[in-house]
Image: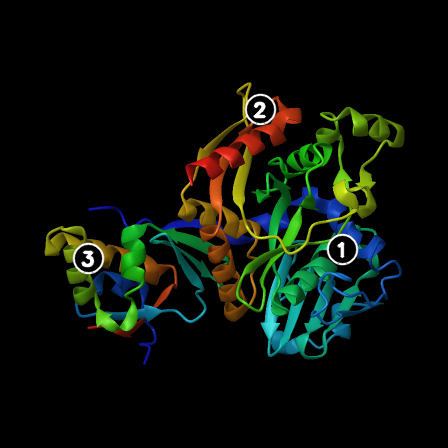
Amino acid sequence: MVVPGFMEDRLTALSASTLLTHAPDVPSRPVEGKGVLINLDSGHYFSLNETGQFIWARLNGEQDLGAIAAEVAAEYEVNPEEALDDTLALAIELLREGLVDVIRAE
Amino acid sequence: MTDSGLHMTLLSQSARVRSDEERYLFAIRDAFPHLEATPTAAPGIYPDSRPLQYTYKEGRKSDLFIDSLGDPIAHSLDFNLYHWKNSFLVSAGERSFAQCFWDDARVEVTVHPDDRENDWVVAHRLFFLPLLEWMRRAGYYPIHAAAFAVAGRTILVSGPSGSGKSTTSLAALAAGAPFLTDDTLFVSRDPGGMLLLNPFPEPVKIGRESARWFPQWRQDFVERHGKISLPDNKLPGGGRMTNCAPGLLLFPSFSEEKVTSFEPMSRSEAMVRLLPQSAIPSTARVLQSHMDLLGDLVEASDPYFFRFAADVPDLIAHIDRLVRAKGRSH
């Protein structure tokens, strides 16, 4: 179930246990490891670099941000703390742009 | 590590480019001469697409059932698209709009009397956009691009208006290259899943800026003091190519250099550039299908930055050398 009323001031409350999924009206397409997304509500489109696409592909409502960050750390050979920081930073951007929904907030 | 790489662009900008005005007048003057015609989407080329029935009437917004859509009418001449159940509303300003009913392939166009003088509003927003949407629902996805063949490969040239599609198209015509389109094409799949490129069969338009490079059209242009329409039977080979496979994908820009040049581009960059030339907003399902086909097209193509210089009459020779060099490298 999508958590309703997830407010802007709670964006920074995202944590490793937060569970996100793609918003329903956001078509996307990977090309050569990178990605493009469209938010039909706002009429804006977005491009994701390789790391961003790696994370986006895993925002499926099954892995929390901590699990995704662990995969990022393994894939790109960076320390886990840095990987979690980057994953949270992208998650905040995606949430702010309405591209993902929160399934579990805590 | 890396930054998150999220970059934002306004999608609808490309659909607002005013300089394409002449092109969309085709919708009324050629295909719908009395605004009451019943055209097929593209006669003879798209046999499996159902005819789209247009009806036209003058009226005000109170004439149509739009209450359930809330207050969707924009207070400008920019167009807006709205979906409601299985209908689709295109508004152009607050008084003129088209309501599309896909179940029975019907479009009701309502134009306020004060807007009739503005052909652009009627032709582009209220006729062409429903036509493009209908084509998408029939499996043909539009791309704002010119296309022709050189050395056996299809060349797509995609970019916003004014980037050089028309000039490159004229260079192809002047060189006798098999020709698909100078502005819009549709990508589709055959029953076996192969990607196909299909033309939007409007006449090729030759404008002042492009014609100045080619003496064979320049004289004609001067005499007529306007754009020249080149009918299909004047195209090299006496008609258009159809059902072409993707080949090279070129993104043009004018260069200050003396010689035209090409630079390989990543396919992800090509996708980012192609998307705003193609993906007019629609439902998530239609747009996802459109993006998937564009992505497959990009992955099946060799993309290049295409910086053309003052050697415009030699453009096709440059492209020919690129195609042959590409062939040798494989």
Q: List the residue tagged with mark 2.
A: B309
| Residue B72 position within the rendered picture, expressed as x and y whole percent measured from the top left | 62, 67
Task: Give the chain of mark 3.
Answer: A
Q: Residue at x 83, y 34 (%)?
A: B226
Using a 10 Å C-alpha cutoff, classify the residue at mark 2 as few (fewer than 14 neighbours), some (14 to 19) or many (20 or more): some
Residue drawn at 76 percent across, 57 percent down: B122
Q: Nearer the viewer, mark 3 or mark 2?
A: 2
Give the percent coordinates (x, y) of residue B106: 74, 74
Which element carries disc 1, helix, strand or loop?
A: helix
Do callouts 3 and 1 mark residues in contact (Cβ within 8 Å)? Answer: no
In contact (CB < 8 Å): disc 3 and disc 2: no
Chain ID for label 1? B
Secondary element under disc 2, as helix, strand or loop, is loop
Q: Nearer the viewer, residue B167 or A49?
A: B167
Name the side, left or right, on which B13 lies relative to B221.
left
- Per the image, the residue denoted by label 3 is A72
Q: Position of residue B279 (x, y in %)?
A: 55, 57
Q: Are marks 3 and 2 on the same chain?
A: no
Q: Mark 1 = which residue?
A: B123
Chain under numbered label 2: B
Q: Is residue B49 left or right of residue B81?
A: right
